[in-house]
Image (tube, rainbow, N blue to C red):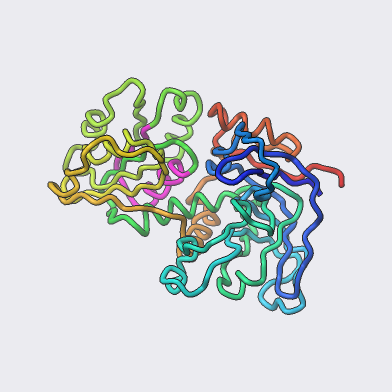
Amino acid sequence: MKALARYGKEFGGYRMIEVPEPKCGPNDVIIKIRAAAICGADMKHWQVDNGSDEFNSIRGHEFAGDIVEVGENVKDWKVGQRVVSDNSAHVCGVCPACERGDFLCCENKVNLGLDNNTWGGGFSKYCKVPGEILAIHKHAIWEIPENVKYEEAAVLDPICNAYKAVAQQSSLLPGQDVVVFGTGPLGLFAVQIARIMGAVNIVMVGLQDDTKVRFDVAKKLGATHCVNGSVEDVVARCTEICGRDNLGLVIECSGANIALKQAIEMLRPNGEVVRVGMGFKPLNFSINDITSWNKSIIGHMAYDSTSWRNAIRLLASGAIDVQPMITHRLGLSEWEKGFDAMAKKDAIKVIFTYDYED
């Protein structure tokens, strides 16, 4: 079968390669991929080639499909079930994060479809969910409700991230306001969760490139205002919209240092920034305001089973709308076209389906 693989350690380019189909062990589950989505984490390696021939991983950690084989010892799952993976493949099972079921914060985690894994990922025909993870973390896969499409289930990863950031990690109350930095899937799903939770003003902050596609989608999904950080004074505009007393929460999904600085400046005393996005440059500004005015910066990573259970119910109920965010549906053979659309911000979510004749 064909698989989109990454080569190299820290950063490395993509290659479409031929790999053997996974073999099912006595405790394993084999999933036939029906839909897989590009994530921002995948984009870090797009058009990067360090010349390495060292295999890293089969990519694609946002995927859904059908169970086509189960090991002889598997009791919880059966052939024919429609399922979605939370992309867990290995955890230690004994650290404080694992003890509380927060498996994606295990320092020894290995994820399906991400770096340095040997089990596979969604950018292929089949993926193996190893029995070792299912023995520790029974909700490493979830059954998809009948009325939820494969392509919608495939993006439950960013939905669950947004759910945890807004609903589980913040102190948001109905009637308050929210500012969301970053117009990617995490930001757009955060807008939807804030809407569900009863926020009054939901302000999406993006840049000039976001005005061509993403601002309109943000408004359709619940943003009451969109602020163009390329031409507007972001702090002044958000304060004007919300008022100082009402803005207690900023969800920062861009990872840009300037966004974190602006978020801290616009928050009221006792406000919170949940930092979802990742940036790798040192801060070049003071964060003394978090002490002077008791503001909090909350780090965010992934989700837990509560996130998944509730996000799946919201998706099945229609409260979360995925369809406006799926801008491109392509065969896996057109993977370069999908990555290019994401890089140009012509796409929000690209869904691949396996289209090779093996």
- Tell me if residue 292 comes above or below residue 111 in the rendering: above
Q: Is 200 in the magenta? A: yes
Question: 249 left or right of 293?
Answer: right
**Residue at x-position 46% and y-position 24%:** 209
User: Where on the picture, by quarter, is residue 285?
Assistant: top left
| Residue 163, position as x, y percentages in the image | 43, 54
Question: 175 left or right of 338?
Answer: left
Work out whether residue 324 or residue 298 is closer to the camera in this orientation and state it.
298
- Tell me if residue 160 comes above or below residue 340 in the rendering: below
Work out whether residue 259 or residue 183 is closer to the camera in this orientation and state it.
259
| Residue 12, position as x, y percentages in the image | 61, 39
| Residue 229, position as x, y percentages in the image | 34, 26
Q: Is 201 in the magenta? A: yes
> Outermost residue, left direction?
292
**Residue at x-position 36% and y-position 30%:** 226
> Outermost residue, top direction?
231
Q: Which residues are magenta?
A: 186-205
| Residue 239, position as x, y percentages in the image | 22, 34
